Image: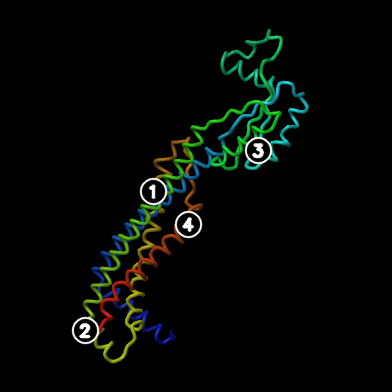
């Protein structure tokens, strides 16, 4: 593609953009709405994943050690646990500390069992996993260590988190693809109208020897312009919506920590830019094909 041809393609693409401005504006409006919905899906997906990750980091299993293990050996047992795959960190809970916690939590009095001669509880470790989807294999590995006599886990919570992540991924992908094809349909029809208006001119160009790509490029550039223009509008609209939610809606809800827009902005820029340009290119390419058969 020579520089002179490129300047011609760009000039014609802009000309098409302006000549069909009513349909173009309608396409930009609808495509922008689709991209905003895509952006909302992306932001919700990232925030829910962040919340799930926070919950995962707090999700734990508890291992109880052999009652005959010495205090020193129990404290040093962390070295063995940390060598097991998928264990991120551990916290030692001595049997004396566990007894105090039991008194406070279940009896409401820190000295309720002061007269107990022998502590019936065991030394234990709170074990935090790197990936909860591998929790069962980690538990299987831990159960083979002779010093560990019992393992307490929360399979129901773990499985719920795994299922939630899978559903979220599937739904997000489905919504994204649906909106992508809606936007593709819109761009395609806009380009078709432009092609129909210039069908005689295109026929003449084909008869005098113009190549398919010479005819096709101005319309592809028009589609790219529509896509990128819509992407810019969608980005700022999504930014405004998200900042409003952070400031007016979520500011009073302390249990939910939403990600800052700056953390997600690059994902939106790349996502909107790529989706907008892709929709413009693909929609234009499909629309032009019919009119190149002379």
Relative to 132, residue 96 above or below? above
* Mark earlier in primary sequence (4, 1): 1
**Marks 2,1: beta carbons within 8 A:** no
Q: Which color mode does the image show?
A: rainbow
Camera-side residue of 155 and 36 = 155
As helix, strand or loop, the secondary structure at mark 4 comes to: helix
The Cα–Cα distance between marks 2 and 1, rounded to whole angstroms, is: 45 Å
How crowded pointer 3 is (Cα within 10 Å; few <14, some 14-19, many 20+) is rated as some
Contact, mark 4 vs mark 3 (Cβ under 8 Å): no
Percent across and percent down for residue 110 are 63, 14
Q: What residue is disc 1 on?
A: 171
Q: Secondary structure at mark 2?
A: helix
Question: Left or right: 96 with respect to 207?
Answer: right
Which quadrant would residue 84 be assigned to in this image?
top right
User: Which of the two discs, 4 and 3, sits closer to the camera?
Assistant: 3
Say above or below: 162 vs 112. Answer: below
Read off the residue under disc 2: 200
| Mark positioned earlier in the residue sequence (2 or 3) | 3
Tell me whether circle 1 and circle 3 mark residues in contact (CB < 8 Å). Answer: no
Residue underneath mark 3: 89
Question: Which residue matches tag 4?
Answer: 267
Q: Residue at x 31, y 72 (%)?
A: 286
Measured Cα–Cα span from mark 2 to mark 4: 43 Å
Tell me the mark number nearer the camera, choosing from 4 and 1. Answer: 1
Badge 4 local density, few (<14 within 10 Å), some, or many (20+)? some
Choose mark 2 or mark 1, whichever is in front: 1
How far apart marks 4 and 1 lie (CA) works out to 19 Å
Q: Position of residue 107 (x, y in %)?
A: 57, 13
- Are the two marked residues, 2 and 4, in contact with CB atoms closer than 8 angstroms? no
**Disc nearer the start of the sequence (1/3):** 3
State the separation of the CA atoms marked 4 and 3: 31 Å
Q: How far is mark 2 from mark 3, CA to CA?
A: 72 Å
């Amino acid at each position: 593609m020579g520089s002179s041809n490129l300047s011609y393609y760009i000039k014609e693409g802009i000309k098409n953009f302006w000549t069909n401005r009513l349909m173009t504006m309608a396409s930009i409006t609808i495509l922008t709405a689709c991209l905003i919905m895509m952006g909302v899906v992306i932001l919700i997906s990232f925030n829910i994943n962040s919340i799930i990750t926070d919950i995962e980091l707090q999700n734990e299993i508890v291992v109880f050690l052999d009652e005959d293990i010495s205090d020193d050996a129990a404290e040093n047992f962390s070295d063995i646990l940390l060598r097991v795959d998928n264990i991120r960190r551990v916290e030692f809970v001595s049997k004396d500390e566990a007894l105090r916690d039991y008194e406070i939590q279940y009896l409401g009095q820190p000295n309720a069992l002061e007269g107990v001669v022998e502590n019936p509880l065991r030394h234990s470790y709170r074990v935090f996993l790197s990936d909860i989807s591998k929790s069962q294999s980690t538990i299987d590995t831990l159960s083979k260590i002779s010093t560990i006599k019992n393992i307490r886990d929360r399979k129901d919570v773990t499985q719920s988190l795994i299922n939630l992540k899978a559903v979220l991924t599937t739904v997000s992908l489905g919504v994204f693809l649906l909106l992508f094809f809606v936007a593709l349909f819109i761009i395609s029809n806009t380009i078709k109208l432009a092609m129909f208006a210039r069908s005689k001119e295109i026929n003449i160009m084909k008869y005098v020897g113009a190549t398919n790509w010479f005819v096709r490029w101005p319309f592809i550039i028009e589609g790219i312009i529509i896509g990128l223009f819509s992407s810019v509008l969608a980005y700022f609209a999504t930014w405004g919506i998200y900042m409003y939610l952070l400031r007016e809606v979520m500011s009073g809800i302390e249990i939910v920590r939403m990600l800052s827009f700056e953390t997600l902005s690059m994902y939106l820029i790349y996502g909107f830019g790529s989706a907008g340009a892709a929709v413009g290119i693909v929609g234009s390419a499909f629309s032009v094909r019919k009119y190149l058969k002379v």
